[in-house]
Image (cartoon, rainbow, N blue to C red):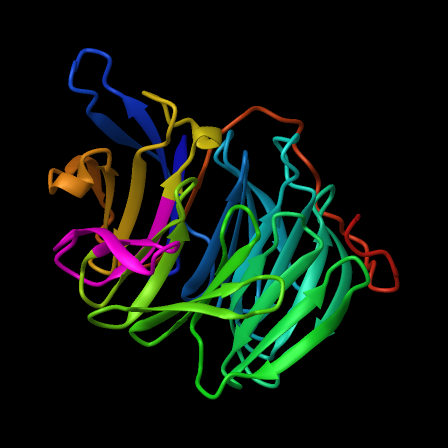
Amino acid sequence: MSLVAGSYERFIWGFKIKTLIDNPDGTLTLVPLFSYPSHLSQIKTVAVSGPVVASGGTDDTIQLYNLSASSSLGSLHDHSASVTCLSFYTPPHLNFPRNLISAAADGSICIYDADGFVHLKSLSVHRKDVNDLALHPSGKLALTVGRDECLAMVNLVRGRRSFYCRLGSQASLVKYDLSGNKFFMAMGEKVSVHEAEDARLLFELENQKQVLCAAPGEQNGILYTGGEDCNITAWDTNSGKVAYCMEDAHPARIKGIVVLSKSAGATGGDDPYLVASASSDGVIRIWDVRKAASGNVTCLAQAQTKSRLTCLDGSSVKSFKQPQVEKSDPKGQDATMEG
């Protein structure tokens, strides 16, 4: 079980989460794996799937890493603007991603085959920056929101934009729930909950201050958000109400939240209970949320990177055959994601 964070100072940070066997209360420790100046400028996004890590920055590149070996796999240079979003598609039965989807500040997205990281296709989706990207659990669709105040849907099988509409205001985040039946959009301090089938609005969740990050829980319709208020709020998206709130989870604004699911190694019961968060003051914390509803939240571990963190993601780590980044120019290929 590992966490990866990116920073404003162009460093990427990797940590392995270990249980202290001699500690009966289940306290964890964050063991540093690597700290590396991987980009020429600010890192804006990281994505992790199994043993593979990708990071995107304002130097217009995507850097790839083998998390198991703490080594570089190479870089991708198919964008001509800052890389703003990254997401892996990993089928449920696999431990290695099938595809990587990236988005950039010029409104474009790129689709890659993760076997060799072959560039399959680029397409223009927004007129301005893509703020966020969400993959449907099926891997066939993606939602994007941009600085042009629009929501778009991309058919990843055909490699084309299939839907585009104006929202009226700029959304900074878009996320699917784990079932793919709902999606969420953050606009300032509000988070809207929508039916995925027809985009019908179900609820508007009113936060105290601007929401900067969000992550869906595995069960019970929980959505975790963090941001300028320094709190981690768990929303019940079935009722539109706050399930519980971890006030002052960090002394600075929260820039990343990861739900460490059973597939990422969570143990100790039928339900996952570990949530990780990162703040702009450089601190990463892991929380036990089993008793959060009663106000008893425990910080199990923390690490200080002494960097201005910008993003966070996490995954399990498994051994694998190291892929090679495709060196040739495959832009003429027509293939996109498998259905």
Please give the count of numbered marks on the rendered protein: 0
The answer to whether residue 95 is above or below residue 206 is above
Q: Is 331 placed above or below 313 here?
A: below
Viewer-nearest residue: 48 or 192: 192
Residue 35 is at least partly visible in this image: no
Residue at 18% in and 42% down = 293
Identify the residue shown where x is 38% and y is 56%: 237
Question: Residue 273: x and y, percent?
Answer: 31, 33
Q: Residue furthest top?
A: 22
Direction front: furthest residue: 239
**Magenta residues?**
232-258
Of residues 75 and 171, the one nearer the viewer is: 171
Give how far across and how far down residue 338 sits, in percent: 79, 48
Q: Which is more toward the observer, 316 or 294? A: 294
- Left or right of 231? Residue 175 is right
The residue depicted at 24 percent of the width and 38 percent of the height is: 289
Can I make out residue 31 in this image?
Answer: yes
Q: Quadrant of the N terminus?
A: top left
Q: Would residue 26 be found to the left or right of residue 316 on screen? A: left
Residue 144: x, y in percent? 57, 69
Q: Position of residue 120 (x, y in %)?
A: 79, 58
Quarter of image, res 270: top left
Tell me which corner region of the image, top left, top right, bottom left or bottom right, holds residue 250.
bottom left
**Would you say residue 235 sits in the magenta stretch?**
yes
56 is within the stretch colored magenta: no
Q: Say which residue appears at 33% left-offset and 29% top-offset.
A: 17
